[in-house]
Image (cartoon, helix red, strand yellow):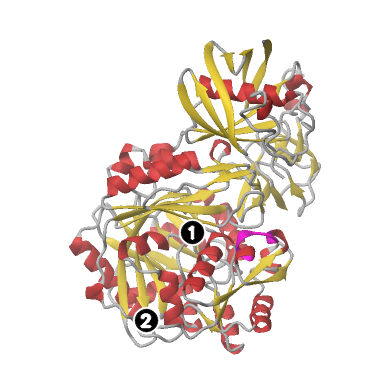
Amino acid sequence: MGAVDFTKILVANRGEIAVRIIRACRELGIATVAVYSEADALAPHMLLADEAVLLGPPEPAQSYLHIGRVVEAARRTGAQAVHPGYGFLSENPDFAAACGEADLTFIGPPPAVIRALGDKSRARRLAAAVGVPIVPGVDDPGSAEGALREAALRLGLPVLLKAAAGGGGKGMRTVRDAADLEIQAQGARREAAAAFGDDTLLIEKLIERPRHIEVQILADAHGNIVHLGERECSVQRRHQKVVEESPSPLADDPFRAALGEAAVRVARAAGYVNAGTVEFLVDDRRSFHFLEVNTRLQVEHPVTELVAGVDLVQAQIRVAAGEVLDLRQDDVSLRGWAVECRVYAEDPEAGFAPSPGRVLHLHEPQLPGVRVDSGIRAGQDIPVHYDPILSKVIAWAPTRSAAIRRMAQALREYVILGPRTNLLYLRAIVEHPAFAAGDLSTQFLPDHLGDWRPPAPPPEVLAVAATLLESNRHAPGSSRRRRAGAIAASPAFADPWDCLRGWRPS
Amino acid sequence: MSDTRGVLVSGSQSVPYVIEREGPAATARVGDCEVVLSVRPVAPGLLAATCNGRNLQVHWVMDGSRTLLHVKGQTYEFELGRAGSREARAPIVEGDLRAPMPGVVSRMLVRPGQTVNAGDPLCVVEAMKMEHLVRAVRPGMVIRVTEPGTQVESGAVVVEVERTTEDADGR
């Protein structure tokens, strides 16, 4: 394939996904424009791009969600296309339309497709109309008092409340007791309104212990649609995916073919163009039920990239430029196994409370078959205003067990000091026998790691810590402020204990 | 040769230690264990330690009074304990509701003067786009609340609740 038609792309996102997209553009020889908020001055994505435009204050509504400012940044810098990444404006049809009106190519599906599929109720009806099974549910029971209760009781408890416009677990609540319906619905509506600007809810019958399996699709503007196999994303905490893999340990060839065919059928019925994901819940009898379509790049897209050998971001850009897919369904074959872990700035010891703050020390794993998609750098202040995702670790190997071992090793070598992270918790997941057995469900974490605690420090760690603290106790400048500096002197000549003083990041 | 002693604090745990230095090596007694160690800096933030003959790679950084360590895939936080320091801290008034994490008080659901029961939702703290509901831990009367929109640090008191008299057993 030759050069792409774009010479400059604006990346309307932040963090690891913005970095990922900028790198893909660079590989294609396309210049990049980053946008950033005041909280992200000197963030990796804005440093990496060829140009960067300040959008405004940290609040998403004043920066990454501000359609007018993003479009204006693209016009001012002469970008021809906008890549929205995931989250923020990626599934906002008004943004896609605003790009079109400003003669910018939105790298994603047409606004009408985003609108149709973004309405989960409409998407469900669309899937049902082409014979794809859906989860029993009630679309928009209305906000009238009692309507929600009536709908929930008609379906039978437990039910799942979801933001009709939603995704990513925001505005989603499980309700098992009718007494909790109102308060949970209020919370779900608030979260939905804050995250998506729309508080419409959808009620679904809860499938107990389902597996979450999704299909990556890729469609061009010329009617060609392929699927790139499935990803299993069953390991979730509060509806947020934590560990994903491709292929799914549950899927055999006939299952994969049936699921992929169903996904392509939904995509074709929706007039889908560009990369997208069709999500399914799979029950304990291996029956799949359509859940929703995500009309954007997924966080977990790298596992598909590694097993299918396709760069999805580059494919998105080529499709948006009007190119014909150079891939037929028969060309797609999955090779080996890939696992992804999401690294979050959260404290597993404190109920997974978000843990923003400065990255004081950073060391990323470098192993064969391991990819780290990161959006952070040493010295960066992780803001409180955005998603807690810091980076993703993706491990590939010929077999699932080898990929898991590689992942465990990578997690062990990954050092982030400053914000607390879930790195050790992630390793506990991938090293758990039930994970190794592929025995997964969306209840995996509460079932197996509900009372997980990190092990207590062993004596050698206590000894090293005591030594370091003693060496720094009377060190000059050991005030409460962080101090710039490096190791004091050449270790060969100085008192070795003095050398331990003063490694404080700037 | 020197001999220093102190207390290492990690979360709610305290471990007394004694370190005896002998040239480039040291013997550390931590709790009931004895560790013979030597520690050499390798690069900023990276140490090569030998503990009882085993190599350990240690990533570390100091942040104010805290020392953060990463050893064998696990991260630890330590502080030096000072005599009486734990008692010297502001006592946690039972019933006060603290922010579970740094964030913004997005909604206050109660007013001063209002009586609440254990488990009642009091306010919502939002951080990194997730809402966290703070509930009353026991019944009482709300005496002070935080203005919505206020940015709070982890552990900051967001709602002050006073025990009501009929409930104040032992007072």
Q: Which mark is residue A1?
A: 2
In the rendered image of this protein, does residue B52 appear above or below residue A3?
above
Viewer-side label of 2, 1: 2
Instruction: For the residues labelled 2 and 1, say whether their Cβ atoms are less than 8 Å apart.
Output: no
Instruction: Name the chain under label 2.
Output: A
Name, please, the residue furthest toward the left: A254
Q: Which mark is residue A161?
A: 1
Residue A296 in view: yes
Q: Mark 1 belongs to which amino acid?
A: Leu
Query: Mark 1: few, some, or many residues within 10 Å (few <14, many ≥20)?
Result: many
**Viewer-proximal residue, A131 or A54?**
A54
In the rendered image of this protein, does residue A340 appear above or below residue B88?
below
Q: Is residue B44 magenta?
A: no
- Whole-percent x, y for residue A310 in the image: 35, 69
Residues in magenta, as a range: A40-46
**Can you say which quadrant of the picture contains the C terminus of chain A?**
top right
Q: Mark 2 belongs to which amino acid?
A: Met
